[in-house]
Amino acid sequence: MTAKSRKTWEQWMETGDWNLSLGNFEQAIYAFGKAIQLNPVRGDGFHGRANAYMEIGDFDRALSDLNQTIKLNPANAYAYLDRGSINFFKKKLESAFQDFDQAVKLAPQETEGWVSRGMVRSLMGETEQAVQDYNRAIELNTEFTRVFFYRGEAYLDMGEIELAMKDFNKAIELHPEYPDAYCSRAEIYIKEEEFDLAWQDLEQALELDPDYADAYLLRGQLNLYESNTEQALQDFDRLIELNPNNGLAYFYRACAWIGNKKNECALADLNCAIALAPEQAVSYLMRSLVYELLGDSAESEADMKKALKLEPEIKSLELLKFLPLNLKFNK
């Protein structure tokens, strides 16, 4: 009788990698676990299992395995990239930045590190440094669609409209089925009052991704601006269906309700908007208007005071820019 054959560490690793590539994540986790049992001082098994955990959304176990990977192999740039991605997902921006920064130092020719660090910098308000990271990523890979989009967003934040437009155009040229770029380009067209072009881009974005929430927000705003209140309501309804925690959706739907002279509905939506984002002075200002329309001067005055406390210059804001054109205020 021959002895039962046993898989080696290498064979378990190959099995794990194979199952990972096929999407058999539970089998991959098992195989990498066997590899770890055979050789717990090599980081590869922990890293492979972390990737499988990430695929099934078990980020806590993935993070634990990535910590062990880095402990065993502190020169593994990809482990830092993966750990940074988890920290980014968990909105731990400082930790994500440290991980991506280390990844860039260990693997300066890896495009993803520069892009990821740039994304964190953008969210941290370091927009110019983010652009520098995106520039380096483009130097490494001129066909990287996402980096043109991210740099365009950074330019948009900086008020560099022409540069932003150029990058969104490039992203669309490289990947014509990229809805994000169409939506962001539509935002520029709206700013420039090129509404026909904005409509085209938003329709294209929604054709590519019917669940693209940002496109419904922008299209709803456009419908609101053009006094198409029924269509605006449909867009904001869909946006709330997709993201019920989006305070802007309730705010703008309230504006549409005002356009339809349904002030009680507007009040309910503004209550939701304020509950979700109590620091937004404009919501109190708009609710002050609704209370005035409803004949409740005491509540109207109270909300005006709240708005002024949050933003002393808010009283000079022209509320009509949020409301349908040619709106007549009738109580």
Image: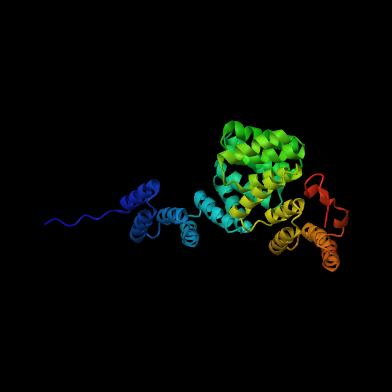
Placement of 105 over or under 311, stated as above or below: above
Question: Residue placed at 61% from the left, 34% from the top?
Answer: 172
Q: Is residue 201 visible?
A: yes
Q: Quadrant of the N terminus?
A: bottom left
Q: Residue furthest left?
A: 1
Where on the picture, by quarter, is residue 295? bottom right
In the image, residue 74 sits, relative to residue 155, either above or below, namely: below
- On the image, the x and y values in percent for residue 180 come to 61, 41
Q: Nearer the viewer, residue 150 or 287?
A: 287
Camera-nearest residue between 158 and 224:
224
Looking at the image, residue 284 sits to the left or right of residue 102; the answer is right
Please, is residue 196 above or below residue 275 in the view? above
Q: Identify the coloring.
A: rainbow
Viewer-side residue, 114 vs 296: 296
Image spot of residue 101 (x, y percent)? 60, 50
| Left/right of residue 82 with respect to residue 325 in the rendered view | left
Q: Looking at the picture, does residue 205 appear above or below residue 31?
A: above
Q: Position of residue 296 (x, y in %)?
A: 83, 66
Q: Quadrant of the C terminus?
A: bottom right
The residue located at (84%, 61%) in the rendering is: 292
- Whether residue 148 is visible, yes or no, is no
Image quarter of residue 311: bottom right
Find residue 116 and report its horizontal and vertical position in percent: 59, 47
